[in-house]
Image (cartoon, rainbow, N blue to C red):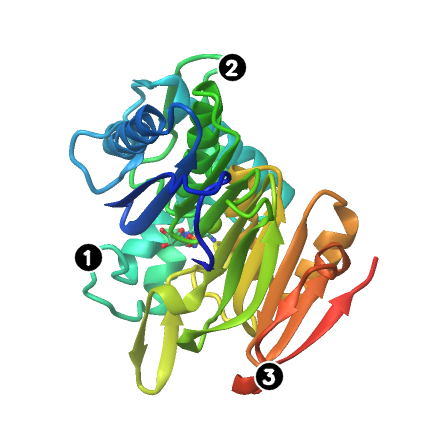
């Protein structure tokens, strides 16, 4: 997603803009308000703090500690934010029937998605690793502050939820500084607070997954948050096949559901992030059924056949731009 249009809520106010690289992605904060400078500094510090807790590639993070102690029977004490992300992740995993699971880490490693030494694991290797993928084997002490992984070899990877969770924390922090208008862009997670300088909703573009220069459409967003998952962000090719960085936790294979990207829009950034990943794994049919069963979010599904499906709550204001690259769109009605 890319912001198009910029400015400040009152004419002449350019806002405080901060661009940074964290959690393995580009981030940009645009903040308006009386205390915009302090607010944007605090937001950046919060992102660094959460990255330091949630990363699994940093040797001193709490997630690294959790992974290191997998199966050794000793509970790991964690910060309330770490506990929250882990329990939300477990809750969302239950909602989507296995399509999202943060304990997919050993499979990610087998495919080389973290080391970037990409390879296609054998069926035997995947069969051996799959028993380690089980979100229910992440033990969260009831209402408490310690967590543990039940089996040796298990590991969690928060890549599919950490940015959304962080977006929610940043929004709350900005509000505590009296900020009402801001755009929080954490890679594919975009939270639109209030309005832009023209007094209009923020305009957020859905990218063409096959063309980094093009948009498929623009969504006017106000006090709502969006998350996009797409295989195109990270993949490798072998023997003419493309392998995406999103894994189906039930098979250990990379997602191959006929979707190029999924965008989820709702009021909850962490859940959006988990859902966009899960719906990408599920594919159109299951994603549509899930949407019908849950009235609390909207979505944009971009199919490999170049059909863009958008749910009816997004129809008003949707500015379709995909014709030039051969896309067409359809509205999904409830
Ligand atoms: P996202 O960009 O939010 O869809 O997250 C993708 C990242 O989440 C990957 O790079 C992995 O780190 C991790 N991941 C991949 N597949 C899954 C899955 N099915 N459930 C949870 N996390 C996943
Ligand atoms: Mg996600």
Is 32 above or below relative to 35?
below
Q: Residue at x 58, y 37 (%)?
A: 268
- The residue tagged 2 is 142
Of labels 3 and 2, earlier in sequence is 2
For disc 2, the neighbor class at 10 Å (few under 14, some 14 to 19, many from 20) is few
**Marker count (numbered):** 3
Q: Position of residue 18 (x, y in %)?
A: 29, 42
Tell whether 88 sits left or right of 62.
right
Quadrant in which the C terminus appears = bottom right
Q: Residue at x 46, y 72 (%)?
A: 209
Is 133 above or below relative to 239?
above
- Specify whether residue 316 is in view: yes
Of labels 1 and 2, earlier in sequence is 1
- The residue tagged 3 is 323
Of labels 1 and 3, earlier in sequence is 1
Is 14 above or below relative to 250?
above
Residue most extreme to the top: 144
Q: Quadrant of residue 210?
A: bottom left
Q: Position of residue 317 (x, y in %)?
A: 69, 60
Q: Is mark 1 within 8 Å of ligand 1?
A: no
For disc 1, the neighbor class at 10 Å (few under 14, some 14 to 19, many from 20) is few
Q: Quadrant of residue 151?
A: top left
Q: Residue at x 58, y 70 (%)?
A: 302
- The residue tagged 1 is 115
Q: CA distance from mark 1 to mark 3?
A: 38 Å
């Amino acid at each position: 997603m890319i912001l198009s249009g910029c400015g400040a809520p009152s004419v002449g106010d350019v806002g405080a803009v901060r661009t940074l690289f964290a959690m393995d992605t580009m981030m940009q904060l645009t903040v308006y308000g009386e205390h915009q400078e302090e607010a944007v500094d605090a937001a950046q510090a919060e992102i660094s703090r959460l990255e330091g807790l949630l990363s699994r590639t940093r040797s001193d993070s709490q997630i690294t500690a959790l992974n290191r102690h997998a199966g050794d029977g000793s509970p790991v004490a964690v910060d309330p934010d770490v506990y929250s992300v882990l329990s939300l992740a477990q809750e969302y995993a239950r909602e989507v029937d296995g399509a999202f699971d943060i304990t997919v880490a050993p499979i990610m490693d087998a495919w080389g998605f973290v080391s970037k030494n990409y390879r296609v694991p054998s069926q035997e290797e995947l069969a051996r690793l799959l028993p380690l993928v089980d979100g229910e084997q992440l033990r969260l002490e009831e209402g408490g502050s310690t967590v543990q992984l039940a089996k040796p070899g298990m590991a969690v990877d928060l890549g599919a939820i950490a940015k959304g969770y962080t977006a929610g924390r940043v929004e709350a922090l900005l509000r505590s500084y009296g900020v009402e208008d801001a755009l929080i862009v954490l890679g594919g997670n975009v939270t639109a607070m209030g309005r832009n300088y023209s007094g209009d909703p923020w305009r957020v573009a859905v990218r063409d997954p096959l063309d980094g220069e093009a948009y498929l459409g623009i969504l006017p967003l106000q006090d709502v948050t969006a998350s996009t998952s797409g295989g195109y962000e990270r993949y490798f090719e072998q023997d003419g096949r493309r392998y995406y960085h999103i894994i189906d936790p039930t098979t250990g294979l990379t997602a191959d559901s006929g979707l190029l990207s999924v965008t989820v829009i709702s009021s909850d950034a962490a859940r959006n992030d988990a859902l966009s990943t899960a719906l990408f794994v599920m594919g159109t049919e299951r994603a549509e059924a899930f949407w019908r069963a849950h009235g609390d979010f909207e979505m944009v599904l971009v199919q490999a056949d170049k059909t863009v499906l958008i749910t009816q709550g997004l129809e008003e204001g949707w500015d379709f731009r995909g014709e030039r690259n051969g896309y067409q769109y359809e509205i999904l009605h409830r």
